[in-house]
Structures are given as C-alpha cells and as structure tokens.
Amino acid sequence: MLTSERKALIQQVLRLDGRLIAKDFSQKMGVSEDTIRRDLRELAGEGLLQRVHGGALPASPAVADFGSREQVGASVKARLGQAAARMIQPGQIVFLDGGTTNVQLARHLPDDLRAVVVTHSPSIAVELARHPSVEVELVGGRLFKHSIVAVGTTSAEAISRIRADLFFMGATGVHPETGITTGDREEAAIKSLIARQSAETIILATREKLGAASPYHIMPLADVGTLVTVAGLPEELLQPFRSSSLALVEV
Amino acid sequence: MLTSERKALIQQVLRLDGRLIAKDFSQKMGVSEDTIRRDLRELAGEGLLQRVHGGALPASPAVADFGSREQVGASVKARLGQAAARMIQPGQIVFLDGGTTNVQLARHLPDDLRAVVVTHSPSIAVELARHPSVEVELVGGRLFKHSIVAVGTTSAEAISRIRADLFFMGATGVHPETGITTGDREEAAIKSLIARQSAETIILATREKLGAASPYHIMPLADVGTLVTVAGLPEELLQPFRSSSLALVEV
DNA sequence: CTTGACATTGCACGATATTACACGAAACTG
DNA sequence: CAGTTTCGTGTAATATCGTGCAATGTCAAG
C-alpha cells in the first residue's frame, strides 16, 4: 500500500462518508494508527481535510466535490431544459415527467406562457407553483420515492383520461435498438401509458444516457418524436439515432 | 461518533428544530447526558448556542432581533410539527394538509414509523420522499398555486375514496364561534371534505391564528378533535377553546 | 555490489482529551 | 415546601495525540 494511494483513499472516504475514524481506518488498511495520524496531519497541513480528535472531517463543511459535480451536471441539464421549454406552444397541454432535467424545464418556462402542464411529479408541481400563468394538473397515486413520482393504478387511471400534445419524458437508458428504458417496472409502465396518451414524446438525454440500457422497457425508439441532447457529442454516439422518424436536436 | 461530528449535529438540530433537549439527544446519540451537557457548555462558550435548563436554544437573541421573525416562526412551527408527529400511531392512515407547519410535521416523523400518509400537497410529498418507511399516497387535481395544494373535482373524487384515522389540517383562522376558516372557497371545500373522511381532525395553530377568522368556512369548532398550539400563550386567548369536546394541547 | 542519504513505518511514552459516574447545589414542579 | 429533575464539579478510567527513536526499505552515486 503506497502512501499516496492511502492518502487518496482517505480523501475518498471523506467525500463518501463525510468522516474518517483513525482507529477503524488503520485496521482496515493494516497499518498502525500512527501512520494514519501522520497522513491526516499532512493532509490537514495542505488544507485537504479538517483534523479532529479521533479522526478527520472534510475540509469544507459540506461536500465540496460532490456539490461541484452536481452543479456541473446542473448546468447541462439547465441548457437542455431551456431548449425544451422553447418547444412548447401557447395553449398546448404538456405532460412533464419527473427528474432533475424536467425540473429545469419547468424552471425555464417563459413567464408569459399560457399552457396546461400535467405532471405526476410533486417536485415539478412545487416548481411550477411559482409560475404566473401556467395551469398545473397534478396526477395522484402512490409515491415512488426513488424517482419522486406518483405511480400505480390510481395514476394510470388519471392519466388515461388525459390527452396531451407533448410529453417530456425522463429515462435512464436511450438505446438505438433496445429503445427507451428505465430502472423500475411500475415507472416504465406509467411512462409508456403517458406516451400513448400524448401526440408526441420528447426525450431530454444527457450524454451518459445515450447508448445505455436499463432493465425495464418503456417504448421503442421509433415511437419517440424528438430526442434533445447537448451539442458537441462525438458523431459515432449520435449516428445510431439519425433516422427519418426521429428528430434529433442538439443544443 | 466523533465529538466534533456530534457538536455539528447539535447545531443542525438547533437550526431545524429551534431547540434541543439534553436528555433526548443523549439517548439518540447513545452517550451520557454529561457528555451532551459538556458539548452544550463548550458550544455556549463559543457563543454558538444559548444554554437553558434542560437543553439549549439557538444563540440568536441578536439574530432574531435583526431579521427573522421567520426564523422564530420556523422554530415555533418546528416544535408544533414535532409534537404532532408524536401523535401518530404505527399503522395509521394520516391525511396531511399543505402548509409550512405540516411540512415541519412531515420532517419530524420518526424514521421507524410505518404508516400511510395521504396528502394533496406536493411539498409534503417531496419532503416525505426522504422518509424510509412511510408510504405516501398523493392526491391529484388542479394545483391551487397560492397554497400549493391540489383542489377541484378530481381531488374531491380521490379524497372521497379514502378513510383516514387522522387529519392534520392547516387553516388561517381558528375562532371559538366562527369555527375554522380559510381564504379560498375551493380550498375550504376540500378541507371540509377531508375532515368528513377522517376519524379525527387535528389543527396545528400558531398564535396569530387563534381568534382570527377568514372569509370561507370549513367546519365548526365542535368538529375539531384536537387543537395543538404553543405553550405560554395568555390564558384569555386560550379560554374560549377550553371545552369538553376539544382536546387542547400546548407544546 | 556497496554505501550512505532519505523516506516510511511501528513502537514507546508522556501529554492531552474524552467520557462516565458520583455527589452536592440549583432549578423546576405541583 | 417537598419531591424531582437538571446542573456543575471532581475524579478516575480510557482513548487519542504528538514526539522521539530504531528498524526497514528505496534509490542513486560511488
């Protein structure tokens, strides 16, 4: 075990756990506590962590690295959301799926837009409560906590009574052959149903979702109307999605 | 558990709850009360909190003076919410109305509580998405943006299919003769319906709501099971609410 | 291959910090 | 005013810390 390797591990533990206990970590590493203490002292000297009795805490009160990565991801999603918001015409009925990208979409709806937004995501509903003119229709049901969206038969029933012009769908996998997929069976069923009730389905996909596949199938790629993604991606990643039936938008 | 971690937690609890009880916190942390008292003394020495008999309060007579009636209000609501959370028995079906006080209630539900929470407030739903064991049933409908709750016939229909054990209602007016009132007609109708579908209605009221009345009537005071309010209010304010049918809880 | 400078590590030991318990004082409650 | 709870201090046990030092390993010059 190299010293620098160990120091890197220390910082990783701090990022992930938010703390490190010298005694435990020394046993885990198979070295003496003295060694760990020395590492901690040195890292603290470089300002990379905060030394406390019994171990160490991250230098910044909160998770600096994690936060910054979130922010970087957020700016890409904000750009996607902004572009998608411009695709909505006044008077349309729009279904907004859950997910952080769609929250960004909701945040960037023009203030003067008059439209109806239907959503089964309480996060989206809360976001849109600030909007002056959009009418919000909340779809109820059992809350699927991981994605924070309503699912189940109650949701399905409510959705089946709605006809939307556009559906902005979130998905974890967008694959040229496998199609659109996500990680939960119930969620997949609901997404599929919403798509069938909507005239056009639009998917906002960040880079890591392109070419990926998750366990549960939602719909084939052929049924997707528009795929919105960020500009500057390598052509070989986009090539499989260039077809006559799918509109590919890069922003 | 590192000492400095524990101290950080103490300050976090003070920010969120507005107070800390030494005995409870020591049990939660699994250390003796002496240890907690020592922590409190030391933090008080640094001016980071205010030591009081039985625990501690935020160190902000100065801060409270400066800006935030909101913060003081938040701590009062947190206390109401905490007390209300303890009134829920495992296995019960509980309806949570919207409002900031009920958000505090949701935040303070014990982590090991197994119950079903029904709500027409997306804010509450988002808050409860973090809870590990509570099942959340979201009631859909048209979003009333001012209060951020779902209203309308869709909501009414969904609510009429539910029977709840408890209903924690928010209201802007609690008057001994006028009864319970709020500022919107639709909202009043929905609240009234939920109350009829629930075995017991509980109202959390901060001081300014007692004795106040708003335009739209929800229900008579006689139909309220429990009124929860803060301790230390003048007796003449509470006297009108002391009756055989109403349980008055001061926290 | 040898040798010496240097880094790393584990161990010893005195110093400091943390904790729980005990007991009288103070505060709260009815 | 009596009973109970909480507080503060003292104390002893334990845990952790920092430093000095010797052992081992690394590496490059001789």
Image (tube, coloured by chain):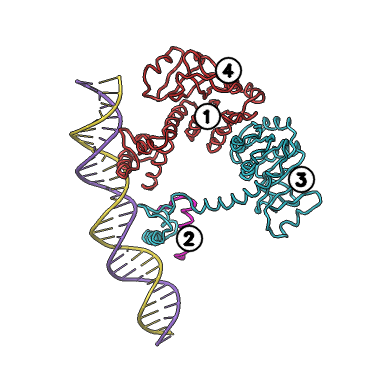
Chain colours: A cyan, B red, C yellow, D purple
A12 sits to left or right of B149: left
Task: Give the distance between the C-alpha atoms of the residues marked 2 and 3, in whole angstroms.
Answer: 46 Å
Tag 2 residue: A8
Please rate how many residues cluster around mark 2, counting C-alpha atoms within 10 Å: few if below 14, some from 14 to 19, many from 20. Answer: few
- Quick one: SS at disc 1? loop
Determine which of the numbered discs, if any, sits on residue A225 in the image.
3
Q: Nearer the viewer, residue A93 or A132?
A: A132
Callouts 3 and 4 close, C-beta under 8 Å: no
Q: Residue furthest front?
A: A112
Circles 2 and 4 in contact, beta carbons < 8 Å:
no
Place of residue D8 in the rendered image (x, y in percent of width and height, measured from the top left): 24, 39
Q: Looking at the picture, does residue A239 appear above or below residue B127?
A: below
Front: mark 2 or 1: 1
The disc numbered 1 marks a residue on which chain?
Answer: B
Please state the horizontal and vertical placement of residue B251, each as a whole percent of the image. 40, 25
Foreground of the two, B43 or A57:
B43
Say few, some or many: other residues with alpha carbon within 10 Å of mark 4 (under 14 / 14 to 19 / 20 or more).
Answer: some
Question: Which residues lie in the magenta part?
Answer: A1-22
In magenta stretch: residue B17: no
Outermost residue toward the right?
A244
The disc label shown at residue B99, or none: 1
Chain letter of mark 3 equals A
Label for residue B196?
4
Q: Are marks 2 and 1 on the same chain?
A: no
The answer to whether tags 3 and 4 share a subunit is no
Query: Could you say whether the residue bearing mark 4 is in a helix, strand or loop?
Result: helix
Kind of residue sitting beneath label 2: Ala
CA–CA distance in space, label 1 to label 3: 39 Å
Q: Nearer the viewer, residue A144 or D11?
A: A144
The total number of labels drawn is: 4
Dot 2 lies on which element? helix
* Whole-number angstrom distance, CA of label 3 to CA of label 4: 46 Å
